[in-house]
Amino acid sequence: MTSDHSTTVSSVLELRQVSCSYETGRPAVQDISFAAKEGEILCLLGPSGCGKTTILRAIAGFEPVRSGQIFLSGQLVSSQEVMTPTENRRIGMVFQEYALFPHLRVQDNIAFGLSQLTRSLRAARVQEMLRLTGLEGFERRYPHELSGGQQQRVALARALVQNPVVLLLDEPFSNLDPDMAGRMRQELHDLLRRTKTTTVLVTHDHDEAFAMADRIAVLNQGRLEQFDTPEMMYHLPATPFVADFVGQADFIPGTVSQGMVQTELGEFPDTLECQDGTTVVVMIRPDDIHLVPTEGARSRVLSRQFRGSENLYTVSLPSGQIVHSSQGSTSVYQAGTTMEIRVLATHTVLFRQPNPTP
Ligand code: ADP
Ligand code: MG
């Protein structure tokens, strides 16, 4: 490869304005840019059909890009002119259905891509992977003799044994029951950290993305809405879509007047610096709304959802606007209880709204 195909950025993986389309109609993903540093765990998060798998397939070299570039370890591997074959990309992959070889024992599944090594080196690498993935003792079993979680570990071991530049995981927990998925998440996180594996994990579950990711790329209809840390994503979402997708959010309409936004829940600083009269919405999370039971107050509890460590209340404001409030698990109020509402937000998230037509 020539030097003009190199990138100056020291990222292990970089996408620059990547678009992909299938033969049918509009692009499946459009103008996607993000980069992964060495050892970083990235999550692609978004609803079904938003283009997550397409991006993974493009990184793996299964899907050509229509425009833009993909770099692996600084080398251009995908563009309109370039399409490095999958086998030359040093990518590890675990897909939803694991795709183990049913007729091979665990040890031979893991050793499958290691034919270039001597027998003893190969055995040593397989042993190391069995240990790392907690599969010691299962090496002579066949895939059908394993649980879903164990099969997934074999798929992981088979991918990691190759020392991939980047590991790609497509909804790796979706075939596991929730209990097992929770445990595997933790295990996988530890394993990726220990092996310092740069990873792109696809999920539609924001809890999973929060638990796993150093940074998250939120996708909506083939476009990247935000690429950020989980904390920034939650507290400073870039768009209403992100705000809503990564957690419970309420949007309170307001109007700007002299640097403040006037709303039914009081005043908030106008962080967008709008002209007077601009209509905006203030995003509020349930953890920012505190309820004080008060006789004669005009907001009232509609319902309570018990969530173990908290109670999530649905509350109606005098205007009919609905908000949610998370309270401690011991704060139990009946439906109909009238409430004063205190907003205790440390910062204000505003979005512009189109002005209502006169
Ligand atoms: P996700 O993984 O986020 O659910 P995909 O990347 O699979 O989304 O799909 C993105 C879009 O591309 C969807 O609109 C989907 O219908 C379309 N798509 C996916 N695979 C194909 C294909 N092989 N041929 C045509 N369209 C496809
Ligand atoms: Mg998918």
Image (cartoon, rainbow, N blue to C red):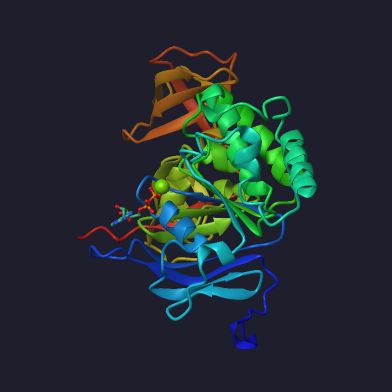
Which residue is more in the foreground, 119 or 353? Answer: 119
The image quadrant of residue 300 is: top left
Q: How many marks?
A: 0
Which residue is more in the foreground, 257 or 342? Answer: 342
Q: Residue at x 62, y 44 (%)?
A: 158
Which residue is more in the foreground, 333 or 226? Answer: 226
Q: Residue at x 41, y 75 (%)?
A: 67
Examine the rendering and report whether any part of residue 253 can be seen: yes
Compared to residue 311, the image places residue 70 above or below, namely: below
8 vs 302, left or right, is right
348 vs 279, left or right, is right
Compared to residue 269, the image places residue 316 above or below, namely: above
Where is residue 341 shown, x and y percent of the image? 50, 30
Residue sticking out furthest to the left: 358
Examine the rendering and report whether any part of residue 211 can be seen: no
Compared to residue 205, the image places residue 57 above or below, namely: below
Where is residue 248 shown, x and y percent of the image? 46, 37
The image quadrant of residue 276 is: bottom left
Where is residue 38 shown, x and y percent of the image? 71, 60
Residue sticking out furthest to the front: 119
Quarter of the image with the N terminus in it? bottom right
